[in-house]
Image (spheres, helix red, strand yellow):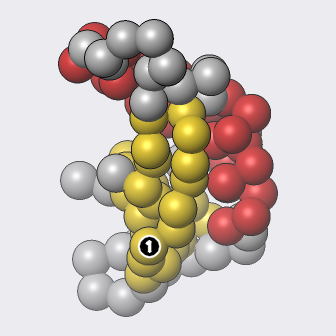
Amino acid sequence: DIAILVSQEILVASISSEIRAAGSNILKEVTLFDVYTGKGVENGLKSVALGLILQGFSRTLTDEDVDSEVVKIIESLRQKFGATLRE
């Protein structure tokens, strides 16, 4: 799961599409489970939480495989939308 902060104007559908485009063949599913604005989130931003299902066909994924995929996706979201990870 990841939670990112993005401008309120950015559509969740655009975020999901970018994740799918940035992900490799181990990314099987992207599921939105929360959008939050309010206390703890800067005005003009929203927190978008997404579940990422990663699965290998021929082998069990290692922590390194998963971490590498998530870093690649987050970097793509940062470049395209100015997204940052919500801590």
Apparent side of residue 6 relative to residue 55 in the rendered image (left or right): right
- Decide: few, some or many residues near mark 1? Use Cα within 10 Å; few <14, some 14-19, many ≥20: few
- Which residue is at 67% across, 54% downward? 15
Apparent side of residue 39 relative to residue 13 in the rendered image (left or right): left
80 versus 14 height, above or below: above
- Which residue is at 62% across, 28% downward? 23
Query: Is 39 in front, or is 12?
Result: 12
**Residue 16 pos. (x, y %):** 67, 54
Task: Determine the image quadrant of residue 67.
Answer: top left
- Which residue is at 62% across, 22% downward? 25
Q: Is residue 48 visible?
A: no
Please state which amino acid type lies under the numbered disc 1: Phe
**Residue 57 pos. (x, y %):** 49, 19
- Which residue is at 30% across, 17% downward? 60
**Residue 32 pos. (x, y %):** 52, 68
57 versus 18 height, above or below: above
**Residue 80 pos. (x, y %):** 72, 39
15 versus 41 height, above or below: above
Question: Residue furthest toward the bottom?
Answer: 38
Q: Is residue 81 visible?
A: yes
Q: Which residue is mark 1?
A: 33
Apparent side of residue 38 relative to residue 27 in the rendered image (left or right): left
Task: Determine the image quadrant of residue 62.
Answer: top left
